[in-house]
Amino acid sequence: MTTWITVCDTCKTEAWQEGDATTDGERFAALIEAAAAGLQGVAVRRHSCLMGCARACNVAIQADGKLCYTLGAFAPESDAAEAVAGYAALHAESAGGQVPYRQWPQGVKGHFTTRHPPLPEA
């Protein structure tokens, strides 16, 4: 089973300047793609707008039959991307998507926005 990191590629932080060639979300997505490369059970996809504009940069961590999470308020930096990818790897290893707090990478603490139960099978 694959844990997906869905990255909003249209996010713009307060530091984003009109006329920038790329959005903060695009930069964050590229960093997450690099950080997740080679992680077993983890894949990355981009999506335009996760509707969390006030907390850019936003990601969703999801897998069939597991708890799903939305995280935001990241800076588009490699440390944050590595923390997101690391958390997704732990999510992939977990039975139901719940990762004990003591195992969370420091860089995701304080960034959780929502938790969703898995969708019913029927």
Image: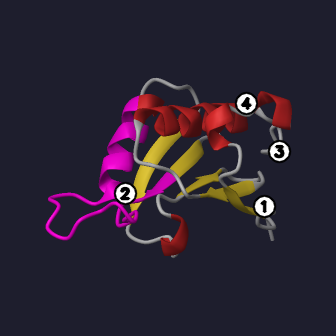
Crowding at mark 2 (Cα within 10 Å: few <14, some 14-19, many 20+): many
Crowding at mark 3 (Cα within 10 Å: few <14, some 14-19, many 20+): some
Q: Which residue is mark 4?
A: 93
Q: Are marks 2 and 1 in contact (CB under 8 Å)?
A: no
Residue 110, horizontal then vertical, whole percent: 70, 50
Q: Which residue is mark 2?
A: 25
| Disc 4 to disc 3, C-alpha distance | 9 Å
Q: Residue at x 38, y 69 (%)?
A: 48
Give amino acid for label 4. Answer: Glu
Q: Which residue is mark 1?
A: 118
Q: Are marks 4 and 1 in contact (CB under 8 Å)?
A: no
Crowding at mark 4 (Cα within 10 Å: few <14, some 14-19, many 20+): some
The colour scheme applied to this rendered structure is: secondary structure
Quadrant of res 113: bottom right
As displayed, is residue 33 above or below residue 110?
above
Q: Are marks 3 and 1 in contact (CB under 8 Å)?
A: yes
What is the secondary structure assignment of the residue under circle 1? loop
Location of the C terminus by quadrant is bottom right
Location of the N terminus by quadrant is top right
Q: Which residue is mark 3?
A: 96
Q: What is the magenta range?
A: 6-34
